[in-house]
Image (cartoon, rainbow, N blue to C red):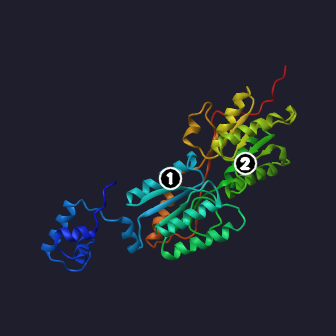
Amino acid sequence: MGKQLVSIVDVARHAGVSVASASRVLSNASYPVSEETRGKVLQAAQELHYAPNSLARSLRAQRSNLVAVLVGDNADPYFAEITRGVEEVANDCGYLTIVCNTERKGERELHYLQMLQDYRADGVIFAGSGLNEPGHTERLNTIVQTMRERGAAIVTLAQHTLQVPAIQVDNASGARAMTRYLLELGHRRIAFIGGPSNLIVANMRLQGYMAALIEAGLDVDHTLILAGGFDREGGEQAVRNLAQLPEPQRPSAIFAANDETAFGVLRGLNSLGWRVPEDFSVCGFGDLPMAQVVVPALTTVHIGLRNLGRSGMRKLLAQLQHEDAIGSELLPVQIVPRATTRAYAPLQTS
């Protein structure tokens, strides 16, 4: 049987004072208490190893010093980097950070938010994109509005349906810039492997890719647009699908909508005996730490994920301190050329 927790009643009894007096001492209340009583209570608390119930105290004070980060997949290094940035700022300011894995499912996201409301979380950071699911936006807005009326702070770190303070990455411009980079290298048949269709961010990156092709006077070939799940398995499956195309219809470059997908592409191409970048140029989006470690090193769109997390937590703190934190901030992105891309050269056939 576990050790029974010591309550404030036990402390009061051990000190020989009333529960009210013990409570005033242990909560640092302004109500006057004699030094003799204060000494008895503090000594009793020390002897009994009393620890205050933080949850009960937060319910009374309507403050918990708890901040939650909602992520689409806690195994995805993209969210791990963002969370590290959030924690760096939160810990310095005395806040506890918890991570809630929504699995990119609307019902799971709503479930977490209701729990966070019950636990009086001081703030919620939506690290992932908004979900395009029927009826979800309305239900999400209802519970978020309830949390904000209580005084909780809400921040989004990606394009979202919520009208709350936001730090956002320019996903469409990043995808457009990467596609232009591939076009400048001479590639004309560029495949795009997308993300989950219910994510706003995935659709914005697809739009950026298509916009760059149209601006270059090229038709959008939908046989080169493949579904993905923002994971390595999706990248490998896309490679298998591309391998089924007749050789003249195959792309010379593959743009994966995130780095995890790009890692799957590299593995899939290698398994089929294709070389990167000699046979295919490959690029991703995000610039995860692993992008510099894989061989060959991955060309990608740099976001600055940890800084994104830090900026989001600072914006949340500004709300809690009633500072001006309204509106959205758009963080720039940049292309980072590495070894997985090169100028287009037609395949030599024997």
- Crowding at dot 2, Cα within 10 Å, few <14 / some 14-19 / many 20+, comes out as many
The total of numbered circles placed on residues is 2
Alpha-carbon neighbours of circle 1 within 10 Å: few (<14), some, or many (≥20)? many
Q: Amino acid at mark 1?
A: Thr
Q: Position of residue 246 (x, y in %)?
A: 87, 33
Please name whichever residue, 294 or 150, is drawn nearer the observer in this view of the structure.
150
Work out which quarter of the rendered image holds the C terminus and state it: top right
Q: Which residue does the image show at 31% across and 59% down from the upper left?
A: 4
Instruction: Tell me residue 111's x, y (percent).
Output: 58, 63
Please give the label number shown on residue 83. Answer: 1
Side of 223 relative to 182 (left or right): right
Secondary structure under tag 1 reads: helix
Judged from this view, the residue extending furthest toward the top is: 350
Q: Judge whether 120 appears above or below 297 on screen.
A: below
Q: In the drawing, does residue 313 fall left or right of residue 228?
A: left
Give the residue displayed 67% in from the left and 56% down from the top.
201
User: Gap between marks 2 and 1, in whole Å?
Assistant: 24 Å
Please report the residue visible at 48 percent of the width from the left and 52 percent of the height from the top. 85
Amino acid under label 2? Gly
| Residue at image mark 2 | 194
Q: Measuring 49% from the left and 66% from the top, which residue is drawn there?
A: 123
Q: Nearer the viewer, residue 349 or 241?
A: 241
Q: Is residue 4 left or right of residue 272?
A: left
Spot the residue most to the left.
36
Q: Secondary structure at mark 2?
A: loop
Q: Quadrant of residue 22?
A: bottom left
Q: Earlier in the sequence, mark 2 or mark 1?
A: 1
